[in-house]
Amino acid sequence: MQKFADLHTHTTFSDGGNSPCALVRLAKSKGISALGITDHDSVNGINQAIECGKEYGIDIIPGVELSTDVNDKEIHLLGYFIDHEDKDLQSYLQFFREERAFRAKRIVKKLNDMNVEIEFEEILQEAKNSAIGRPHIANVLISKGVVDSYQSAFQKYLGDYAPAFERKIHVSLQSAIKLINDAKGLAFLAHPGKMPEDLLQTVLASKIDGIEVVHPSHNDSRTKFYRGIVNQYCLLASGGSDFHGGIKNDEDNFGKYVIPLDSVYEIKSMLSNQNK
């Protein structure tokens, strides 16, 4: 019987709704054999996932999701099979998390200027020990009755180009790839979606290792297109649900957007060859 993997998931250590162990248990119930933990700017949930993975017989792929900037456009990279205890990597991620907090303060200031009564301390309480993101602010807005849904929070206040939007600090594409590679991992372009052709070509001209082919935002034609790109440029293919849980209401995606376990072996084999 064919086995499957989901290489794109988030836990409560970034903006996910499930603890690492809860996510592993859910993966077991969905028949997933290998699970990539790819929190935004954080690797702090990986050890917990690995321990729970041993209990439930699920292989955990240590990962991370980073934001980069190409021609003033934000794109995301996924790092797979990283050494999540690498000191330089952890130092960089700590810097990114601190910048996330500064960004949240700027968003709160904009909301206050719009007569939305919200305090930064409320965001901290919502985020707990995770990397602060806009979903945490959305949760607070919902709990205070400012908006009635996650979607409404982003449409009215937090989404790109919305009144309270603030850009994140980004590293360059090459710096992000190097950060992942120096941590002994491979760098993949995340959810390229409807990325313009010129931007995709810029990414392909970099030393990217692969592309996330399977993703909820990709319809069949997009998935086929990215498979063609992978073959044309001799890249690796990954995929996953980008599962968050909680208020994102994306439970139906988990277990649906998967890739064959053999694809994970291909990624690991390439990594082994590079590290020889």
Image: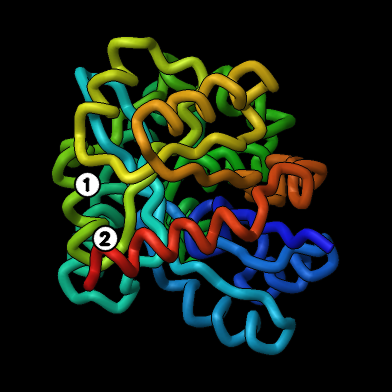
Quarter in which the N terminus is drawn: bottom right
Direction from residue 235 to residue 3 in the image, left or right: right
Residue type beneath disc 1: Ala
Marks 1 and 2 sit apart, C-alpha to C-alpha, by 11 Å
Crowdedness near tag 1: few (<14), some (14–19) or many (≥20) residues, C-alpha within 10 Å? many
The dot on residue 223 is: none
Residue on which the image places disc 1: 176
Residue type beneath disc 2: Leu
Q: Which residue shows up at 26% across the image and 57% down it?
A: 180
Spot occupied by residue 159 in the image (x, y as percentages of width and height): 49, 23
**SS type, badge 2:** helix
Residue on which the image places disc 2: 93
Q: Which residue shows up at 41% across the image and 30% down it?
A: 112
The outermost residue toward the top is 197
Looking at the picture, tell me which residue is in the foreground, 194 or 243.
194
Looking at the picture, tell me which residue is in the foreground, 164 or 23.
23
Q: Which residue shows up at 29% across the image and 36% down it?
A: 168
Spot occupied by residue 48 in the image (x, y as percentages of width and height): 54, 81
Direction from residue 58 to residue 211 in the image, left or right: left
Circle nearer the viewer, 1 or 2: 1
| Up-down relation of residue 171 to residue 197 (above or below) | below
